[in-house]
Amino acid sequence: MARKQKKEKKEIVYAPIVYQPITETIEKNYMPYVMSVIVSRAIPEIDGLKPSHRKLLYTMYEMGLLKGGFTKSAKIVGDTMKLNPHGDASIYETMVRLTRGNETLLHPLIDSKGSFGKQYSSNTVASAARYTEARLAPICHELFAGIEKNAVDMVDNYDATMKEPVLLPTTFPNILVMPNMGIAVGMASNICSFNLAEVCDGTIAMLRKPRLPLDKLMELIKAPDFPGGGAILYDEEEMKRIYTTGSGSVRMRARYVFDKENSCIEVIQIPYSTTIEAIIAKLTVLYKEGKIKEITDFRDEIDLNGFKLTLDVRRGTDPDKLMAKLFKLTPLEDSFRCNFNILIDSTPRTMGVQEILHEWIKFRLGCVRRELKFDLKKKKDKLHLLLGLGKILLDIDKAIRIIRKTEKESQVVPNLMKGFDIDEIQANFIAEIKLRYLNREYIINRLAEIEDLQKEIADMEEVLKDELKQKALIIQQLTEVKKKYGQPRRSQIVSAGAIKEYKEEEHIENYPARFVLSREGYFKKITFRSLQGNDEQSFKDGDEQLHLVDGQNTDNFIFLTNQQQLYRAKAEDFDTTKASALGDYLPVKLKMDADEKPILMNIQNKYPAKESIVLIFENGKGVRISVANYEITGNRRKITSAYSKNSPVVAAFYEKSPMEIMITSSDGRAILIKSSLIPIMATRTSGGVTLMSMKKGVKVVSATNDPKKIPEDAKGLKKIKIPSTGVLLDKK
């Protein structure tokens, strides 16, 4: 028999559980991630760029795309990954936003060929990188000016194979010209764009007068300026808040023209913070709800000529009134939430326009000084070489003789140093001069540069010592930038005080009408002209009239239902109909719950405390609730828990003054009481007080205030106290 081998049991060794305090986890694991997102990804720096922008633009600069022709976007994206290894998709998305074709920036940083989508349309997306081409726009000369002169620090890329700039030495405050949005961890940044010419003027004024009053700055930099244009509703106090704190809101409206001949409104500019799809989606909802009956059709007509949204309107429509309505109800009026959060020395700071310009001036002064020092060193080095050259002018033959008699090449420089009392750098320069240049004319011409160099060096040293002269140099650069790239404002400035706020009642067509509610929940709005032909109301079999009231098309209604809910509606929400029609079915129109139907209708334009809703319950109790308890602000259309659910409601009445109510029970008994006997309760959900004393198993089946349904001889039914015992109707 084969020998059975015993299976050895392997002992499982568990690693010890190491507990880590949550504070330590946050400090070691979470905080480094947070700082990385804030500093290296989401928040722009004083040059107006995020790291992803800077890496892309510097890659294009190194590719020679500032002066060269267009290059495939795919190649640019691929080369950028040497600096930004976060995937080609995110790099291309960054690139798209900077292009002229996307229309996101007032001054695009990248010239583009091909389809790059549109900022104002979420459905118009960019073509794949392999189909599009790009190069740097001319304004990038201002972003990179001085980068070759050590204007900014250069650091290693992620794998230390090449260098990249920490910031770009932009010659104008790009931080205020380029719109920027970023969401970090626990903070965000949302910077709107300002007009380049205005920003240059404001910066020049602050360079000349560092403590420039806010009012003067606001005269120069009037308001934000958005690439898509639109109209800014100027609120001076809110704008001051933005300029001083960096936080606030800019209200914007679309701009439009009215084509009277074709009876259509053409929206040609929309707020920067919305898209045409968002506007059309809202218009669609309003159209289906019947709230924009003036419009017969609307469509997206964006083409090569730019943005256009066309609204076909009915003949006779006032376009300005219609647009005032649309501004209120759609994103054709929107707000840009400002949050000027910027990294200064790797520290996020929320700053106003004034403080941002102070920080930019400080940054730019540092760049200018570094450029001056770089140029100064170059000129001093050149002067040093020319001074050495000047020493051989006295005896060129001696220099030739020294070189000719030197046996070893390595001794040429030392022998020249010794022969003319010059240093090694000067000796190397002389030794490298071609034989054809060793003539008196060449040397005299070169030495003539010495005087000019000495003057230039003295001027540079003077500028480096004097901050005012450095500022004058920056002013000169800003003036040139404004002259080359400045353009008129795109966003129109309109005083917010001059805008008449939309009031719905002013835009509603008003006329008298009769309103009818049936017991099954059918609602009719009938004009009196229609009633002249036939005023006999038609209902479904088994249905009957519950309420009838005359009012205006501008009236507001409340509908109380059998499921303790109250709905608000406007008369204009309903189409006019004829008395012979069934009308709108309220449970569907108002989106009521299953098996829910209205039991009370009333015109409710105001909510006076002295008027009440009277409710009679199946358990013989009743309650009066002041209509003031149902007053709410805003556009809320539904109130839940409108009254007590302790017992099913039998009837509801609207009380403007005391009324007589006859209450009938299931055992054929009834009482007739004044509604004023029922106490008013402070809360909507109060169960009320007992009105009618009933035996066990008996319940209230009906209640009415209709004089036609109350017996003519009702003295025996009348009660002056509650609770009261009912009187048999057949004995009455």
Image (cartoon, grey):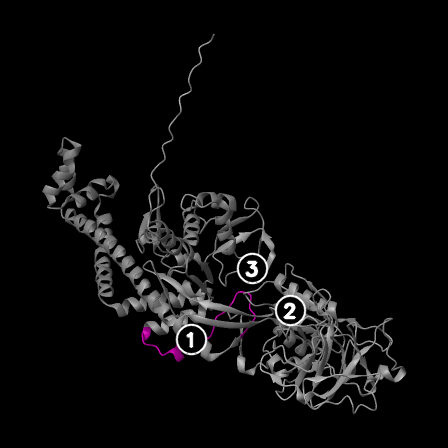
Residues shaded magenta:
208-232
Q: Are marks 3 and 1 in contact (CB under 8 Å)?
A: no
Look at 36% across and 79% down and name the residue there: 213
Could you tell me how far apart the alpha carbons at marks 2 and 1 are, in whole angstroms?
31 Å
Magenta stretch holds residue 224: yes
* Snapshot quadrant of residue 412: top left
- Whichever of labels 2 and 1 marks the residue nearer the N terminus, that label is 1
- Which residue in the protein does label 1 denote? 241
* Snapshot quadrant of residue 679: bottom right
Neighbour tally class for label 1: few under 14, some 14-19, many 20 plus, Cα within 10 Å = some
Spot occupied by residue 604 in the image (x, y as percentages of width and height): 68, 82
In the image, is residue 343 above or below residue 723? above
Spot occupied by residue 488 in the image (x, y as percentages of width and height): 51, 70
Q: Visible in this render: residue 306?
A: no
Spot occupied by residue 245 in the image (x, y as percentages of width and height): 39, 72
* Snapshot quadrant of residue 657: bottom right
- Residue 119, label in figure: 3
- Which element is circle 1 on? helix
- Which element is circle 2 on? strand
Front residue of 366 and 578: 578
Callout 1 amino acid = Arg
- Whichever of labels 3 and 1 marks the residue nearer the N terminus, that label is 3
Q: Specify the quadrant that holds the C terminus.
A: bottom right
Callout 3 amino acid = Gln
- Whichever of labels 3 and 2 marks the residue nearer the N terminus, that label is 3
- Residue 295, label in figure: none
Magenta stretch secondary structure, dominant = loop
Look at 33% across and 71% down and name the residue there: 207
- Which residue in the protein does label 2 denote? 267
